[in-house]
């Protein structure tokens, strides 16, 4: 069995290689950069931009859908504890590095862009060894382990927040997809497309896979709502859908709809009066660009507590309210949403 799987003919020699992924928060900025390179004429076409990810990540679906080539490396991230699974992960990382090294030798890209995540490490290390220019793109206020490592050797580090601690940092902001930029200022049109009237629209989501505690808290809020007319669009994620993490006893004043995945999130966000979600870097950036007020619930246990740092930046500018995940167990979400709505 080969060490990688290719969803294209492989990277074109002398092109741009974008490495990393795993979650939508890593992949979407990479796709935004890839599209901008094509649109600006920096490359001759989509075949000059190639992405490298992991076979377990959301990039397996998102990248081909966007029309770019993708190579996926086998393996997964390494945890700090010594376990049999971790030993296997180390071997997988070594195999991934060998594959990435061969890939870069053949393609000789002009530059490698590291998005963070598992696949960025083999490609970034190979770039350093082969003296291919390396640029790190860090979406979060607190950099992840991959970009902390690679940032030491990168020509530049593109950061989303001014206080992100990376060497040779350049404040670029977090790249957002064209669909988000196009949705700015389209509130009335967006509401027509979503099919909502002048009632308040609350949008809740937990990320590309969902969030059990957040889903349960939103469902409890809906079931206990005793206010005026309200529309709720609840994106529960694949796991939430399979385990039934949605409201059931919905009061008459609420028009409630739950889905596993929203295929047109930019339009839904543009139509919203208020959003409740985790505070991944991409969510924070998209809400900031759209100017939609939000309640941000950082994911507990995120590496470096980066989601709390992300949320504090947006909350500090007055664009969001930060609510700790621990407070989802009580009535805090009910009280907060009741006040905001």
Image: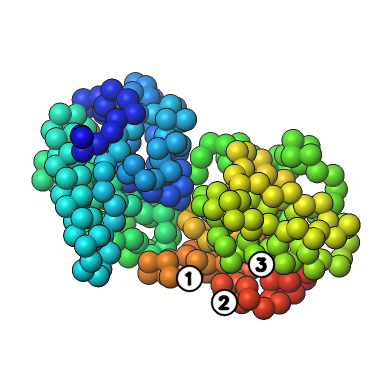
Please state, as top left, top right, bottom left or bottom right, where the N terminus lies in the image: top left
Label 2 Cα crowd, 10 Å radius (few <14 / some 14-19 / many 20+):
few
* Disc 2/disc 3 C-alpha distance (Å): 11 Å
- Please state which of residues 215 and 194 is positioned toward the viewer in this rendering: 215
Label 1 Cα crowd, 10 Å radius (few <14 / some 14-19 / many 20+):
some
Q: Which mark is residue 265?
A: none
> Which x, y percent locates residue 273?
74, 54
> Which x, y percent locates residue 311?
53, 65
Kindly indicate the quadrant of the structure image that contains residue 143.
bottom left
What secondary structure is found at the residue carrying circle 1? Answer: loop
Left or right of 154: which side holds 214? right
What secondary structure is found at the residue carrying circle 3? Answer: helix
Earlier residue among tags 2 and 1: 1
Instruction: Name the residue that disc number 3 marks.
Output: 217
Q: In this view, does 239 lie above or below 338?
A: above
Any part of residue 103 in sight: yes
* Disc 3/disc 1 C-alpha distance (Å): 15 Å
Q: Nearer the viewer, mark 3 or mark 1?
A: 3
- What residue is rendered at 73% in x and 59% in y? 247
Q: Is residue 262 above or below residue 210?
A: above
> Which x, y percent locates residue 72?
30, 38
Any part of residue 163 in sight: no
Mark 2–mark 1 contact, CB under 8 Å?
A: yes
Instruction: Name the residue that disc number 2 marks.
Output: 326
Left or right of 51: which side holds 339? right
> Which x, y percent locates residue 262?
62, 43
Q: Is residue 280 above or below residue 64?
A: below
Earlier residue among tags 3 and 1: 3
- Please state which of residues 299 and 16 is positioned toward the viewer in this rendering: 299
What secondary structure is found at the residue carrying circle 2? Answer: helix
Instruction: Name the residue that disc number 1 marks.
Output: 300
């Amino acid at each position: 069995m080969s060490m990688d799987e290719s969803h294209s003919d492989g990277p074109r020699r002398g092109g741009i290689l974008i490495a990393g992924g795993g979650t939508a928060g890593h992949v979407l900025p990479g796709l935004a950069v890839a599209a901008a390179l094509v649109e600006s004429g920096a490359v001759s076409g989509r075949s000059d931009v190639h992405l490298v990810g992991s076979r377990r990540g959301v990039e397996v679906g998102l990248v081909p859908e966007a029309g770019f080539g993708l190579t996926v490396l086998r393996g997964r991230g390494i945890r700090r504890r010594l376990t049999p699974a971790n030993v296997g992960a180390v071997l997988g990382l070594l195999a991934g590095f060998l594959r990435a090294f061969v890939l870069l030798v053949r393609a000789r890209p002009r530059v490698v862009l590291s998005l963070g995540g598992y696949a960025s490490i083999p490609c970034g290390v190979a770039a350093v060894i082969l003296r291919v220019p390396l640029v790190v793109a860090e979406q979060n206020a607190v950099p992840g382990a991959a970009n902390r490592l690679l940032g030491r050797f990168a020509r530049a580090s593109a950061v989303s927040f001014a206080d992100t601690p990376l060497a040779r940092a350049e404040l670029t902001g977090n790249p957002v997809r064209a669909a988000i930029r196009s949705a700015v200022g389209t509130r009335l049109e967006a509401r027509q497309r979503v099919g909502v009237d002048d009632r308040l629209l609350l949008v809740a989501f937990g990320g590309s896979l969902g969030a059990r505690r957040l889903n349960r808290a939103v469902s409890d809020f809906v079931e206990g709502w005793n206010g005026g007319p309200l529309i709720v669009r609840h994106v529960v994620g694949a796991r939430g859908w399979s385990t039934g993490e949605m409201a059931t006893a919905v009061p008459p004043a609420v028009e409630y709809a739950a889905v596993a995945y929203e295929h047109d999130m930019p339009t839904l966000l543009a139509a919203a009066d208020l959003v409740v979600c985790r505070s991944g870097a991409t969510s924070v950036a998209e809400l900031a660009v759209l100017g939609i007020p939000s309640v941000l619930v950082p994911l507990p246990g995120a590496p470096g507590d980066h989601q709390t740092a992300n949320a504090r930046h947006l909350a500090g500018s007055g664009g969001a309210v930060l609510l700790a995940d621990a407070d989802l167990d009580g009535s805090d979400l009910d009280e907060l949403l009741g006040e905001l709505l």
